[in-house]
Image: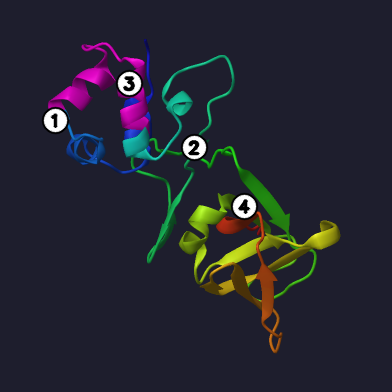
């Protein structure tokens, strides 16, 4: 099977050793190298382990009929300005995961600008603690929502601080889920 492990690893700026240590359980750099070059067969198990280590979906590591999920880097910007990369480089754009929803911003509020897209990861009640001090989308009655900063969780009550300056704290009781902001997509 032809894989894109090397391309994705290099796009992430990782060495064979970095990927080997990030695998669960860890492995050796030589094994990763053999899997990249095809001298060792890549099983589904290995594909999933390496995808986890690289922070991508396993399908991003195999060639398929659809266009590759990658962007070519045209320039590198630094203190001395913009320049062409010294060697061909790619970046892997984010892929939508199951359980993600989006929020669009129609007018600027807080740190968000009109036109922003906020990708959110949906969490069940057992994972609400992971969203503490982060921006969240909370469902309310009659198809309404609340979007703000989760500042406290007290048993079955969530305390949400609205994004607008001077806004009053809102308390939501027993929401079935919340969605925590994870990715900001902003056009230039």
**Residue occupying the point 57% across, 51% down:** 124
Relative to 71, is 152 above or below?
A: below
Label located before the other in sequence (3 or 1): 1
Label located before the other in sequence (4 or 1): 1
Asked if the magenta segment contains residue 41, the reply would be yes
Relative to 81, is 67 above or below?
A: above
What residue occupies the far front of the structure in this picture? 155
* Residue 50 locus on image (x, y percent): 31, 30
Q: Quadrant of residue 67?
A: top right
Q: Is residue 44 left or right of residue 121?
A: left
Mark 3 crowdedness (10 Å alpha carbons): few <14, some 14-19, many ≥20? few
**Residue occupying the point 71% across, 74% down:** 109
What residue occupies the far right of the structure in this picture? 142
Tell me which secondary structure the magenta stretch mostly adopts.
helix
- The quadrant of the image that shows the N terminus is top left
What is the span of residues highlighted in magenta in the rendered image? Answer: 30-51
Q: Tags 2 and 1 in contact by the CB under 8 Å rule?
A: no
Q: Which residue is mark 3?
A: 45
Label located before the other in sequence (2 or 1): 1
Mark 3 vs mark 1, CA separation in Å? 16 Å
Q: Colour scheme of this structure image?
A: rainbow
Q: Which residue is mark 4?
A: 119
Q: Which residue is mark 1?
A: 28
Q: Which residue is mark 2?
A: 72
Judged by depth in the image, the label closer to the viewer, 4 or 2, is 4
């Amino acid at each position: 099977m032809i894989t894109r492990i090397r391309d994705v690893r290099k796009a992430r700026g990782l060495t064979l050793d970095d990927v080997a240590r990030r695998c669960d359980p860890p492995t050796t750099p030589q094994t990763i190298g053999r899997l990249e070059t095809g001298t060792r067969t890549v099983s589904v198990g290995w594909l999933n382990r390496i995808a986890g280590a690289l922070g991508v979906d396993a399908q991003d590591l195999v060639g398929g009929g659809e266009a590759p999920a990658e962007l070519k880097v045209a320039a590198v910007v630094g203190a001395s300005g913009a320049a062409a990369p010294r060697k061909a480089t790619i970046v892997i754009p984010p892929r939508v995961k199951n359980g993600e929803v989006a929020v669009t911003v129609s007018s600027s509020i807080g740190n968000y600008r009109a036109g922003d897209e906020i990708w959110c990861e949906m969490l069940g009640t057992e994972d609400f603690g992971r969203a503490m001090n982060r921006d969240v989308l909370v469902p309310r009655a009659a198809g309404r929502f609340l979007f703000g900063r989760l500042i406290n969780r007290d048993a079955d009550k969530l305390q949400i601080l609205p994004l607008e300056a001077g806004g009053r704290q809102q308390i939501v009781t027993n929401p079935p889920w919340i969605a925590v902001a994870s990715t900001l997509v902003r056009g230039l």
